[in-house]
Image (cartoon, rainbow, N blue to C red):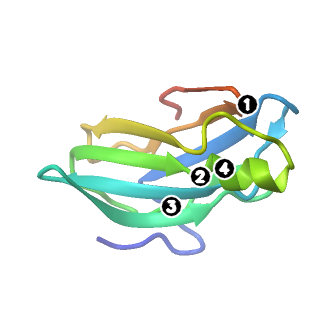
Amino acid sequence: MTTASDTERSHVTTHVLDSTIGRPAAGVPVILEHDDLGNWVMIGSAETDADGRASRLGPVALPVGRYRVTFDTATYFAEQEVRAFYPEVQIIFELSDAAAHYHVPLLLSPFAYSTYRGS
């Protein structure tokens, strides 16, 4: 697997928005993992930028399979001096088209979150 360079985006990207303040969530640590026969293997990590995006989260190409994105929300909210209910958010998804880009946004607040398949 080839890791994304400074000019390339990874096969899986994310964008975190803090819905409490209506702004991007900068500085959220994110981990991308692949399910290898029931064992989660880390294949990439990043921290969201000032716009709340992680566009170089892992490899530029991934095989079909099950993946997990974990957001360290405890670190983010601690930096904001906000006590939150969810210390992390994990999103498991199926990458079923090796040619398609997968964007996994997270809408975040201290007591709720939601996600969807973005583009």
Which of disc 4 and disc 1 is earlier in sequence?
Answer: 4
Q: Quadrant of the N terminus?
A: bottom left
Residue 100 seen in render: yes
Q: Amino acid at mark 1?
A: Ser
**Do residues under tags 1 and 2 come within 8 Å of each other at their CB atoms?**
no
Which of disc 3 and disc 4 is earlier in sequence?
Answer: 3
Give the x, y percent position of residue 82.
83, 42
| Mark pair 1, 2: CA separation | 13 Å
Q: Amino acid at mark 3?
A: Leu
Please tell me the numbered disc located at residue 81: none
What secondary structure is found at the residue carrying circle 1? strand
| Mark pair 3, 1: CA separation | 22 Å
Nearer the observer, disc 4 or disc 3?
4
| Mark pair 1, 4: CA separation | 11 Å
**Do residues under tags 3 and 2 come within 8 Å of each other at their CB atoms?**
no
**Do residues under tags 4 and 2 come within 8 Å of each other at their CB atoms?**
yes
Please tell me the numbered disc located at residue 72: 2
Circle 1 residue: 109
Which of disc 2 and disc 1 is earlier in sequence?
Answer: 2
Q: Amino acid at mark 2?
A: Asp
| Mark pair 4, 3: CA separation | 19 Å
Question: Residue at 41% of width from left, 54% of height from top?
Answer: 11
Give the x, y percent position of residue 64.
21, 46
Circle 3 residue: 57
Circle 4 residue: 74
- Of the pair 28 and 104, the residue shown nearer to us: 28
Give the x, y percent position of residue 53.
67, 51
